Amino acid sequence: MRFFAPFFIAVLLIPSASFSTPGDVLNQINLTMHHPTGIAWDGKSIWVADRKTDMFYRIDAASGATSDSIASPGYFPAGLAWDGKLLWSTDPTDAKIYATDVSSGKTVVAFDSPAAGPMGIAWQGNALWVCDNSEKKISKIDPTDGTTIISFKAPATDPRSIVFGGGYLWCSDRIKDQIYGMDPASGTVVIILDAPGRFSWGLAWKDGRLLNADYQDNAIYEIVAKDGVPFKTYDSRRATVDFTNEATTSGTGEVSSLDINCAIPVNRPNQKLLKPIAYSPAPTRFTKDRWGQGIAVFHFENLESPRWLEVSMKVELETSAIRYFIYPENVGSEIPADVKKMYLADEIKYDITNPYIRDIVKKVVGNETNLYWKARKLFQYLIANMEYQLAGGWNTAPTVLERGNGSCSEYSFSYISLCRAAGVPARYVGSLVVRGDDASYDDVFHRWCEIYLPGYGWIPVDANAGDRDMPADQSAAFGGIGNRFLVTTEGGGSSEYLDWNYNAQSTSVTTGKCRVKVESIAEWEPLE
C-alpha cells in the first residue's frame, strides 16, 4: 500500500570552485525527516529510507520535494539500492534482504543475509554487494538467494553503506567519518574522502557524483568523487625545530678533522619554511650530493681531547598532513629518463637482481603493467609479511624480507628494492618527528618511501605506518602522511655526505687513542 507523506525539504546549492577536490560538497539537501539511513538514485529521483517511520521516500533531486512514499518491508530499513527495476533494502535486526516493486509497493524478493548484520547494499550489473556491520565485511552475493560470491574485510570498523559507481565500490564509515573507494576485485582501499557530515550513512551514485545521507545532520550531500586536483593538505601546524648535533671527544689523542654534514630541508607540497634557516655556527660551506640533496657542511680541525662542541640548524615551518587522490586508471606509463636513470638503479642495500627479490616480484606483480597496482601490490605484500622490530643495523633488502622484521629504514630499503625490481621508481625521505606533545624532542627520527607515478609525481608511501589491521589504515599510508614531520632529506641510496643516513652524518680523522661521539636531537616548539 502506498501513501504520501508531506515532508518539505530545502535544497542548498553550494558553488563549486574552479578546481574541486574529491570530497568537496557541491549541493546539499536538508531533510525534515530525522532518521535517514540508506539512499538510492533511480535515474530521476532520490529514494531515502527512514529508520523511525520504517518508510521509503521518493525525493525530487532538483526541488527537494517528496513525491511518494512506500512502507519498508523491514522494521529497520538501513540500506537501499536501485537495480533499474526494483528497490533493494536491508534490515540488520532481522538479517534480511528485500526487493520492492516501487510501482506497487509489494515486496517481490526476500531472503536471509549471508552475514548477521547487513547494513548497506549496492547493485552492480547482475549482482548485489552487502556491507555487514556486525562482521565488518563486504560481500558480493547472488541476488536470487544470497549465495556469497566473494567477500573481504570492510575498510574500517563501522561500515554503514555501500554503492558501486565509476568502477569502484564506495563505503561509508560512521566512526572514521570517511568514505572509501575500493577496488571491487580485491577490496583494496584506493581513495579516502572525508565525509561532509557528522554521522555518515547512506550512499548513492548520481551522474558521476556521490550522494551521502548524514544521520545526524539530516541532510543529503552531493560530493565530488573524482576531479583534477591530485591531493589536498590539511591539519596544519606551525613550529620551530632546533636540530642539534653535539660532538664529544675523549682519550689522549687528537681529532685531526671532524665533519658534521646536515641535510637542508626545502619547501614541499605539505611543508613550508617560514623564514631562512638559522645556523650556529655558520656552516663551512654548502653543497649537494649526487641525489641533489642540499648539505650544510660544518668542518673542524685539530681538536684536542676532551672537547665538546655543538652545531645547530633552527627551522621555522608550517607542516601539514597530505592525502593524494590517485586513480589507477589515470596513472601514466611514461617515466622521465632522468627519473629512470636515478631511481630504478641498483644499490648495495637494495640488491634488486637477487633471486629472492626477483621471485617475490614475479609472484606478487605477475603480469600487471599499471605502475600504481605494481606498487600497491608490493606494498600489501610487505605489510603482510613484515613486522616492526629494531634488530640492530641496516641489512640488505633480501636479508630483511627473509627475516620478516625490521626498522623503518629497513622497511624503506625493502620496499624500494621491490619497487625498482618491478620497474617502479622509488626513493626515500628522512625526517625529524613530533613525538607526542607539540613541545617535544626526537632522537629516533623516521624514514619512509616515495614512488614516482606519471601524472602525479612523487607520492609518499610509508609501509611501516601502513602495517595495520584495517584496510583504511593501510591505505592512509599509501599516498598520505600526517603533520608530524619536518622532512630534511630526499635520497635514492648511498650519499657521499650522508652515506645511508638521513638528517645528518659525521665523519672524523683521529690520531692516537681518541674517541668521537656525535649525538643528534630535534627539539620541537609550537609557534603561537
Image (cartoon, rainbow, N blue to C red):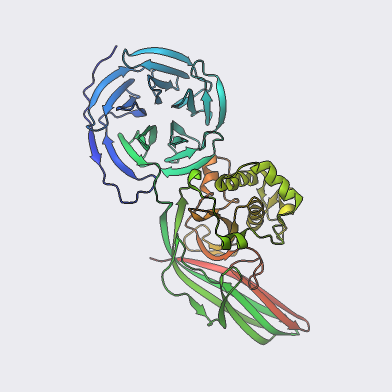
**x, y percentage for residue 472?**
51, 42
Vertical relation: 285 (above or below) 168: below
> In the rendered view, does 453 fall on the left or right side of 104?
right
Asked if residue 13 shows in the view, the reply is yes
**x, y percentage for residue 464?**
60, 51
Residue at 65%, 72% (x, y): give it.
496
Image quadrant in which the C terminus is located:
bottom left
> In the rendered view, does 109 fall on the left or right side of 503?
left
Residue at 24%, 33% (x, y): give it.
62
Q: How many marks?
A: 0
Residue at 76%, 50% (x, y): give it.
355
Relative depth, front residue between 345 and 398:
345
Vertical relation: 194 (above or below) 133: below
Relative depth, front residue between 162 and 456:
456
Relative depth, front residue between 95 and 324:
324
**x, y percentage for residue 269?**
45, 60
> In the rendered view, does 438 fall on the left or right side of 467?
left
